[in-house]
Image: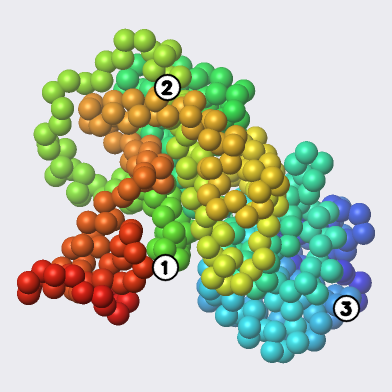
């Protein structure tokens, strides 16, 4: 045995992660893949890595020094369970199994519980940054036990992306905490992408600028407070010209957005936790709407406003779109962090929200300047109940809100869908409201279901005898 770490699953993510591990001082990496060809190819193409290839799980276990540590990088779901079963068979108490696939956090909780009974440590780890991140430095979100973190910490710190001198990895919390945070990361990514797409659409339809001209706008935005990987690649995509037709590539790409399901998981989980993540939900639903051509084709002739959008001052309009985008983005991130806070409370994880924002500054898709502001906010007030109420964000929202409202009005007036812009604004105004019409909803619930209500002026729970003489009685609290 001479390898200190092993990788199971050598498709694009696993082979890149294995190469990343092998490139760091002190690591000797064992590699195993179900079908032999991938292992042979990786070892042949990368002699510099000094891989220790294994062709059975027994051989893989024998090649690892104790405590054996292996990262699984296979398809999430059944394949992951199959590999875990094999590793549990050949590993011993104290060894560490890390699942770096995109598992649903509740699967990770289940697996951790089952594996822990064997004395083996199981760590569910979110890996962000795609293939390039895996090779050059991902953002890593490991869960699992404190004991496994002692062994894993130095190895993961050595391969993670580095942002402002700090490795983009932290021990998120126990069992499924890492995969939970990775899930919300992906949900925020959906919201951020949708907001950028809405901004592009408004600018294009409002000013008539070409995609290449709008690419310049995004490149300019990338020099300011919106600076981020997603804004940067948006400029690149908009500038791309299709070789075949010489049209902007964005105009020949079919307008149906795909999804692998992590946005839906984020929303489903938020629904069960009772946390509004409207920005993420709208982004997820917008992808669904786009992907129903049969509905869209029969809906094309639905009536819309008479006049198309015609903006008088293009530069002023673009600046207002920028402010609306930034304000909506603050809402989306605030909602995402709220979901992490609620998940931590529900599942008993001690998650440092500031540390989460810091490890997203490098390696991952939502890496951005902006995350420093989130880290600052939690450093000042670790138990901040709503992220967007931190002073910096209050200032930014105050600066942007007039423009944000005008952009949402403009979009509605012109019949341009801006679901994430407008739902974020509605959420913001909902939080701000002194009184919400929820009082009326409680009245309705009491009317048809005797669900009772509380009063603003005295303690207790009340019910109006709606079908009787409509006097109020004190009632049991039944909600
Ligand atoms: P895939 O998700 O395409 O999985 C292919 C790998 O799974 C191959 O090594 C394959 O072995 C192995 N595998 C399967 Br399928 N069934 C197996 C089984 N029953 N037993 C053992 N191995 C099995 O690979 P990927 O795109 O590299 O992604 C790996 C993981 O990383 C996934 O969970 C993915 O969601 C996650 N992830 C991906 C990205 C990304 O950007 N692609 C980013 C972050 C996380 P074979 O060669 O023998 O068929």
Give the number of the disc on residue 272: 1
Percent position of residue 313, x then y: 36, 10
Q: Which residue is mark 2?
A: 320
Report if the CB atoms under discs 3 and 1 are less than 8 Å apart: no
Front residue of this view, candidates 35 and 335: 335
Q: Which residue is mark 3?
A: 66
Instruction: Judge whether 225 appears above or below 352 on screen.
Output: above
Instruction: Judge whether 335 appears above or below 474 on screen.
Output: above
Q: CA distance from mark 3 to mark 1?
A: 41 Å
> Which corner quadrant of the image does residue 267 belong to?
bottom left
Instruction: Judge whether 281 appears above or below 122 on screen.
Output: above
Front residue of this view, candidates 5 and 169: 169
> Which corner quadrant of the image does residue 1 belong to?
bottom right
Residue at horizontal 28 percent and vertical 28 percent from the top: 409
Percent position of residue 370, x then y: 61, 36
Front residue of this view, candidates 48 and 313: 313
């Amino acid at each position: 045995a001479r390898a200190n770490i092993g990788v199971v699953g050598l498709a694009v993510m696993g082979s890149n992660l294995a190469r990343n591990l092998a490139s760091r001082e002190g690591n000797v990496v064992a590699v195993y893949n179900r079908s032999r060809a991938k292992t042979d190819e990786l070892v042949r193409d990368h002699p510099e890595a000094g891989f220790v290839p294994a062709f059975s799980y027994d051989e893989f276990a024998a090649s690892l020094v104790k405590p054996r540590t292996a990262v699984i990088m296979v398809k999430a779901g059944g394949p992951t369970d199959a590999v875990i079963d094999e590793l549990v068979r050949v590993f011993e108490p104290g060894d560490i199994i890390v699942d770096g696939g995109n598992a649903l956090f509740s699967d990770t909780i289940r697996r951790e519980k089952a594996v822990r009974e064997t004395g083996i440590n199981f760590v569910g780890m979110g890996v962000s940054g795609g293939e390039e991140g895996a090779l050059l430095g991902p953002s890593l979100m490991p869960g699992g036990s404190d004991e496994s973190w002692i062994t894993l910490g130095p190895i993961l710190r050595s391969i993670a992306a580095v942002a402002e001198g700090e490795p983009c990895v932290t021990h998120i919390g126990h069992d499924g905490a890492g995969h939970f945070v990775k899930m919300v990361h992906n949900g925020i990514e959906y919201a951020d992408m949708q907001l950028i797409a809405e901004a592009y659409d408004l600018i294009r339809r409002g000013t008539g600028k070409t995609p290449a001209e709008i690419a310049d706008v995004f490149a300019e935005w990338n020099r300011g407070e919106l600076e981020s990987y997603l804004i940067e690649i948006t400029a690149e995509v908009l500038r791309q010209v299709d070789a075949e037709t010489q049209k902007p590539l964005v105009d020949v790409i079919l307008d149906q957005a795909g999804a692998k399901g992590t946005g839906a998981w984020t929303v489903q989980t938020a629904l069960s936790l009772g946390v509004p993540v409207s920005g993420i939900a709208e982004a997820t639903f917008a992808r669904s709407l786009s992907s129903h051509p049969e509905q869209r084709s029969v809906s094309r002739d639905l009536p819309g406003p008479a006049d198309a959008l015609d903006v008088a001052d293009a530069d002023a309009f673009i600046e207002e779109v920028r402010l609306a985008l930034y304000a909506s983005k603050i809402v989306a991130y605030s909602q995402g962090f709220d979901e992490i806070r609620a998940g931590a409370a529900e599942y008993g994880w001690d998650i440092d929200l500031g540390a989460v924002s810091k490890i997203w500054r490098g390696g991952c898709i939502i890496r951005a300047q902006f995350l420093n502001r989130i880290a600052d906010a939690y450093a000042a007030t670790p138990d901040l109940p709503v992220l967007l109420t931190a002073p910096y964000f209050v200032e930014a929202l105050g600066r942007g809100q007039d423009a944000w409202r005008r952009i949402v009005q403009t979009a509605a007036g012109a019949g341009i869908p801006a679901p994430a812009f407008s739902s974020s604004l509605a959420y913001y105004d909902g939080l701000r409201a002194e009184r919400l019409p929820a009082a009326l909803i409680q009245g309705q619930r009491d009317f048809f279901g005797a669900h009772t209500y509380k009063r603003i002026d005295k303690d207790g729970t009340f019910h109006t005898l709606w079908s009787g003489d409509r006097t109020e009685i004190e009632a049991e609290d039944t909600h």
